[in-house]
Amino acid sequence: MNELAPKSRPAASPGTPPALTSRPCLRTAWLSALACLLLALAAIPWIDRPVVDFAHVHTQGTRWIEHIAELPSPLFVLAWPTFVILGAVLVWRRQLPVWATTLWLSAGAVGVGSVLKQGLKFTFGRTWPATWIHENPSYLRDGVFEFRFFAGDGAAYASFPSGHLTVILAFTTVLALRHRALRWPCAVAIALTGFGQLAAAYHWTSDALAGAALGIAVGTAFVAVWQRWGSRLGA
């Protein structure tokens, strides 16, 4: 079954189109993003350091956990090429299969989320839990726990928000909103990524929650805009 580009869709009929997301689902997604953001603010003073202390003693440096933490890494590389290629096909053929439309939207959400998280990392300039790049000051080595707004030192002050949580939530939010059957696999992927990032002491808990909030918001926006764009053009 194909999904038409908004401009070429016929008037709505009982079987057209598949994979539409209800307003309550979209509203729940927006509320989930807000909840993650509020939890991130609460985690900064009360949860971040105890979790990193625990991870440092019990799980940091475990190879299989580090592999799990990198689960979303291919998305950083594949997002923009996938978005451009499928977008070109959509413009050329005026339609895509439903699965391809979902992949196109999720790739766009990942790409935009990646750009936005880089801007936020520069803005907040947060120190990392551990030292791992450019001899960056860190909590575990130097006892440093702070935000240096607009620090301008690239990756050395770029812990907040988590890019991996941003992209996995952007990707899975689109999938879960458009295809109910994928919600549980998406939840497992999110849980594994979050566990890996925290257990490896790659990120603070608030970094992960803020990344999740950003990813959910971007993914939801892509789904909502696609549906509204179509409806306004007579889909």
Image: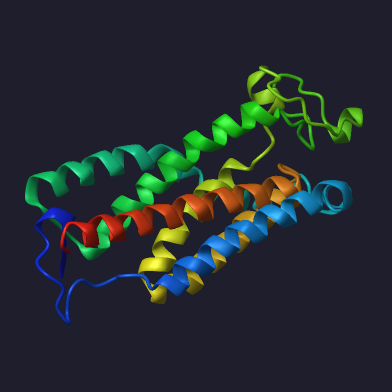
Residue at 66%, 61% in the rendered image: 35
Horizontal relation, residue 185 to residue 155: left or right: left
Which residue is at the front of the view, 49 or 224? 224
Compared with 42, 113 (above or below) is: above
Question: Which residue sits furthest bottom?
Answer: 14
Horizontal relation, residue 100 to residue 62: left or right: left
Color style of the picture: rainbow
Residue 81 percent coordinates (x, y): 30, 38
Question: Which residue sits furthest right?
Answer: 143
Residue at 22%, 58% in the rendered image: 232
Horizontal relation, residue 172 to residue 154: left or right: left
Query: Residue 108's image quarter?
Result: top left
Horizontal relation, residue 82 to residue 161: left or right: left
Residue 65 percent coordinates (x, y): 68, 53
Compared with 157, 196 (above or below) is: below
Is residue 66 visible to the viewer in this orientation of the structure?
no
Residue 228 percent coordinates (x, y): 30, 59
Residue 147 percent coordinates (x, y): 78, 30
Residue at 65%, 28% in the rendered image: 123
Assign the C terminus to one quadrant of the image. bottom left
Residue at 69%, 35% in the rendered image: 159
Is residue 210 visible to the viewer in this orientation of the structure?
yes
Q: How many marks?
A: 0
Assign the N terminus to one quadrant of the image. bottom left
Compared with 140, 97 (above or below) is: below
